[in-house]
Image: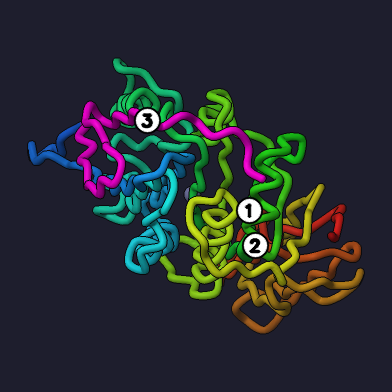
Amino acid sequence: MPQTEMPQSKLTLLGEEIKPGDSVCLQFDVAKLHTRNSIKVPIFVERAKKDGPVLLLLGGVHGDEINGVEIVRRIIRNKINKPIKGTIICIPVFNIFGFLHLSRQFPDGRDLNRVFPGSSKGSLASQFAHEFKKEIAPFVDYVIDFHAGGADRVNKAQTRCMFNDEKTLELAKVFGAPFIVQSKLITKSLRETFHKLGKTALLFEGGKSMLYDEEAIEHAVQGTRNVIHFLNMKKLKTITKNKSIIVKKSKWLRASHSGMFHVQIKNGEWVLKKTLLGIVTDPFGEFEKKIYAPFDCYIFCVNVSPIVNRGDALFHVSLETEEK
Ligand SMILES: [Zn+2]
């Protein structure tokens, strides 16, 4: 059963009172563009007549991770965000500034996920983080933050949390992505801020930037349905057959040479030691360097960049797993 629910008799977001049964779109208005146009972040709030937990679904913290935006859009489109109990808040495009020109960063060059909890006198991204922390974060009980791999790194659908945070690990198991990966809190991240506020924050990773990854989207939408059902916010069809592979320790295999890169395995696979994972070549047919698995492992992120430099992260692999 879910943990204690926050009393929800009065809910005020961005200074607006959200009454039981309300369905509203709020505008989070923090800053203007250099053209002086106002930029507002739409926030969709669905409050049921009955009290219950407050769940926040967040996409587009990084403006080029359109997969997360699509996941939240699809949840809204399919009305999964209309609870019978409690409140579901959807923010499909959190970093709308970055999304406008499909960049990971804020216009000030900052990574929004590295400036939390922010400050009212800081950079633009920092002010944005500060307002969010003050006006929205305190009223939320659970968060699912949807991301995608940076650059050309394709993540197999996975949730990330700290395994000593039992509530979040429980939520990750309910979510049921193919992988659950132990991941320390990154300083000044959104997840760290929520953790410090005592909230349960789950991070989802699937696909890569600038790409719709249908398999990852489906895992994310189904995982969200599983969580909503688990929190007793709405009866939804849940899928429990997907038992997640729990990765307790992981590491990156990096390129030992620069060159053209050819992946030889499927993302998500279990491979035995000495399996051929990829080949780095020169463009002239003279040089070929084969990359083999150094031990038995799962592969849950693959770099699909056609060109790599020595030291680039190529494969994220498991060092230690616990299978349910
Ligand atoms: Zn991201």
Q: Is residue 89 above or below residue 289?
A: above
Give the magenta range: 1-30
At label 3, which amino acid type do we have? Ser
Disc 3 from disc 1: Cα separation: 31 Å
Q: Quadrant of residue 34?
A: top left
| x then y, percent, for residue 254 | 72, 56
Badge 3 residue CB within 8 Å of ligand 1? no
Q: Position of residue 177 (x, y in %)?
A: 65, 62
Which residue in the structure is indicated by mark 1? 159
Question: Residue at the location (27% across, 36% down)?
Answer: 18
Considering the numbered disc 2 on the image, is that residue within a helix, a strand or a loop? Answer: loop
Residue 278 is situated, as x and y percent measured from the top left of the image, at: 73, 74
* 10 Å crowding of disc 1: few (<14), some (14-19), many (20+): many
Which residue is disc 2 drawn over? Answer: 177
Asked whether 18 or 273 is in front, the reply is: 18
Q: Is residue 52 left or right of residue 204?
A: left
Disc 3: which residue: 9
Residue farthest along the left direction in this orientation: 36
Q: 256 or 126, which lies in front?
A: 126
Q: Is residue 151 visible?
A: no
Three-letter code for the amino acid on which mark 2 is drawn = Ala
Q: Secondary structure at mark 1?
A: strand
Residue 148 shown left or right of residue 43 in the figure: right
Instruction: Bin the neighbour count of mark 3 within 10 Å (Cα to Cα): few under 14, some 14-19, many 20 and up.
Output: few
- CB under 8 Å between discs 1 and 2: yes
Whether disc 1's CB lies below 8 Å from ligand 1 is answered: no
Q: Earlier in the sequence, mark 2 or mark 3?
A: 3
Is 2 in the magenta? Answer: yes
